[in-house]
Image (cartoon, grey):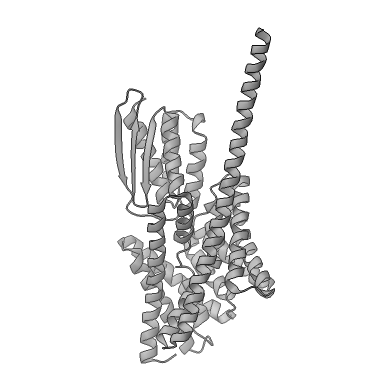
Amino acid sequence: MNENRVLILANLVGKIALQSGAETYRVEDIINRICKHYGLNAQCFVSITCIITSVRNHKGELFCSVERVPNRTTNLNKVHSINQLVRDIKKYSFDEFAKNVNIIDKEVPYKKYMYFLAYCFGAFSFALLFKGKFNDACCAFISGGLIFVISDFAAKLQSNSFFINTLGGFICTICSYLSYKMGFTDTVSYSIIGAIMLLVPGIALTNAIRDLVAGDLLSGISRAVEAFLVGAALAIGTGFALFILVRFGGI
Amino acid sequence: MLLEILWAATSTFAFGIIFNLKGKKLFCASAGGALGWAVYIFFKYNGSSIPASFLYSSIAITIYSEIIARFLKTPVTSTLIASLIPLVPGSGVYFTMSYLVENKIEDAVAKGTETILITVAITVGIVFVSTFSQIYYKIRRYNKIKKKIDLRNSVKLKKQINRF
């Protein structure tokens, strides 16, 4: 078996898992399992933006590869399928395994209108969950849709998540304020909260804690900082919009 | 109150779609969200403080997803992340900011402290359960290996006895 091919494949699998939102120790475990199956002794270091793997074959020759992970999305279904595939690695030959990895990599997520509906209904039910009235929920429905349109557009431009969250917080505050001024809702807060919940850094927080517990201090701390930054961006966006409204309109 | 639990389930469902969960996992995650919110409401109305009820709720959700993950053979995170979303204090962030902007500093500090406390409570809940599950599985694996070694040793002993 060619060591370079195994190394490249293992790093590709790790990259897919890390990009889809897996924890650090899971990525390390996946890479170690693949290398071990093909008889290589692997040492690998995964941080949130980078995968470094070095393997040694039975002759003692060293091979090393570094993989940068520039952007991350959340696709938990991919994490599940990759995890399952690697656990069943004994059933596949090398080429079959590589083929399956490619299939998972190109797996189609939900259609765009499904995401749109999910954002809308998510904001709708969050507004009702925090004791808002039906009208508040309808307003949150609209701002949820707006947030999806903005984040989709910003993802196409490949701008950073800080900017997206600031803009999202800003837009949903303005939207709720407009509906309040038109007399559609009684208060501003419930519809804003409903829409804000869509942008809150839940996944970064959970993964940060799980990484810290597993002992990956470096990536745990970087994920925690990411969660804090996203929360701060959200607060700045809403705060800025509220500041403008208080100054020029009055709430 | 039942309606609130229903809304928690639907919001978790919507988040499951945003996180690309499919099939059974989607429904399990939204059931987890409903469970978490039910536990939170139960403790809140029985006189626990708000951070404490968040702590109990996050413990319940983490135990639930650790169990469900073994049944569905998926990573724990796939249900945990979506189910925890209703607990994350988005409203705290908003109210802190709004009080700050309206110059009500004392209210802002109180709300901000509560938000931080809630985040810490959720964190402690997850850490608590994940640590104990890690220890539990390590002990189980240790016992399995020990059994194997014992078996091998007994076979060796029998062979040695047969030889003599």
* Quadrant housing the N terminus of chain A: top left
Front residue (pair B9, B64): B64
Q: Residue at x 58, y 75 (%)?
A: A128
- Tell me if I can see residue B99 in this picture: yes
The answer to which image quadrant residue B104 occupies is bottom left
Above or below residue A177? Residue A50 is above
* Quadrant housing the C terminus of chain A: bottom left
Q: Position of residue A94 (x, y in %)?
A: 42, 29
Above or below residue B30? Residue A188 is below
Front residue (pair B158, A212): B158
- Determine the residue located farthest toward the top in the rendered image: B164
Above or below residue A161? Residue B144 is above
In the figure, is residue A87 to the left or right of A15? right
Q: Position of residue A200 (x, y in %)?
A: 46, 67
In the figure, is residue A75 to the left or right of B10? left
Q: Position of residue B91 (x, y in %)?
A: 51, 75
Q: Residue at x 36, y 73 (%)?
A: A167
Q: Position of residue A74 (x, y in %)?
A: 44, 55
In the figure, is residue B46 to the left or right of A79? right
